[in-house]
Image (cartoon, helix red, strand yellow):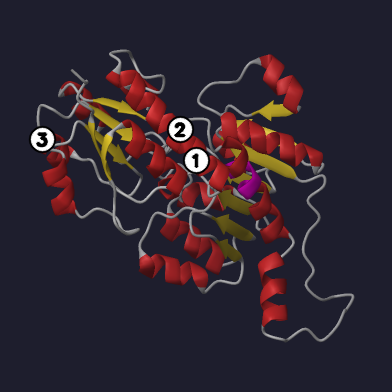
Amino acid sequence: MAKQRLSVVVTRRLPEPVETRLAELFDVTLRDDDTQMSREDLLQTVQTANVLVTNLNDRIDSEVIAACGPQLKLIANYGAGVDHIEVEEARAKGITVTNTPGVMTEDTADMAMALVLAVTRRIPEGLAQMERGKWEGWSPSAMLGGRIRGRKLGILGLGRIGRALAHRARAFGMEIHYHNRRRVHPGIEEQLQATYWESLDQMLARMDVLSINCPHTPATYHLVNARRLKLMKPDAVIVNTSRGEVVDEAALARALKAQEIGGAGLDVYEGGEEMAAELRSLGNVVMLPHMGSATLEGRIEMGEKVMLNIRTFEDGHRPPDVVLPEML
């Protein structure tokens, strides 16, 4: 007698190769269009599915966990960040949570470096000038940006992505500094020629560029707040490819508007459309639509990790990417 296949529900469209393989392996329910599953559908789905494949737009809070039927045993998140999932409550109900770490390291580091260059060299401003047909020819004083060679890069969170960014920044001649919950191994510091700062405040006051690469947790919420923004140099640049909640976005907007810091490159956001509109109105901000990990290769690799976690779980073994509360 053939083994009954797991019922797997995916809350958002995934790349076609991932969806095709999911359909081959499981009894999968896919989205018909590229829209997020509604709250009502989500609450109904968790009452019947064996596995829920979520993404960062799904709010898996206490209400959703409480609605989960006894058959739902795995939440396989399509992405590394799990701050949208109540992991401890899920585990207390016997539900395993997995994620897809390490897949988007290189892609996100590429984007962080691109934002450093875009802000310091004013690339979007130049592009907009050309698109509007406003270029009046070369001038010695036109579109002057800043040279990044020799600038101090402070990395907030020297994990996989932070280290990948450090390698790129060193190739551009930047000095590498970092702040972490824990100091990394001396061998890593030596390889990156990185200087550790135990005090985040002291590091911020001395950096030319700050790159935020730490996850969003209760401990990192608004870690870069109004007080810390005032510590930074007036020509300093902030780049955030991690999570919008790490920065007090309203305080950042005020500092940028008052020219208390030089500029920002953002791929993630805390606030809604009103705050985004305020940021878009500022000339010293480069904004991207959360595309740091948006490569076809990366998205397929994320799907492969999701499927490996599900198949390992189906076989009765611990999935390789189980999220534990102490990791958060």
Q: Label 2, secondary structure: give it.
A: helix
Query: What amino acid is labelled 2 in the image?
Result: Glu
| Residue 15, visible in the rendered structure | no
Q: Mark 2 highlights which residue?
A: 304
Query: What amino acid is labelled 3 in the image?
Result: Ala
x and y percentages locating residue 176 in the rendered image: 72, 35
Instruction: Tell me what residue is drawn at x 71 percent, y 28 percent.
Output: 194
Q: In the image shown, does 102 or 188 lie closer to the viewer?
A: 102
Distance from the alpha carbon under mark 3 to that under mark 1: 31 Å
Q: Residues within 10 Å of mark 2 (few under 14, many from 20)?
A: some
Does the magenta portion include 109? yes
Distance from the alpha carbon under mark 3 to that under mark 2: 29 Å
Residue 115 occupies quadrant: bottom right
Q: Label 1, secondary structure: give it.
A: helix
Q: Mark 1 highlights which residue?
A: 300
Q: Mark 3 highlights which residue?
A: 66
Instruction: Tell me what residue is drawn at x 69 percent, y 35 percent.
Output: 166
111 left or right, relative to 174: left
- Circles 2, 1 touching at the beta carbon (< 8 Å): yes
Q: What secondary structure predominates along the stretch shown in magenta?
A: helix
Range covered by the magenta-colored residues: 108-112
Q: Which mark is residue 186?
A: none
x and y percentages locating residue 279 in the rendered image: 49, 67
Tell me which label, 3 or 1, sits earlier in the chain: 3
Distance from the alpha carbon under mark 2 to that under mark 1: 6 Å
Q: In the image shown, does 320 or 192 lie closer to the viewer?
A: 320
x and y percentages locating residue 62 in the rendered image: 16, 38
Q: Residues within 10 Å of mark 3 (few under 14, many from 20)?
A: some
Q: Which residue is situated farthest in the front direction here?
A: 1
x and y percentages locating residue 148 in the rendered image: 78, 51
Q: Which residue is situated farthest in the top direction here?
A: 317
Query: What amino acid is labelled 1 in the image?
Result: Ile
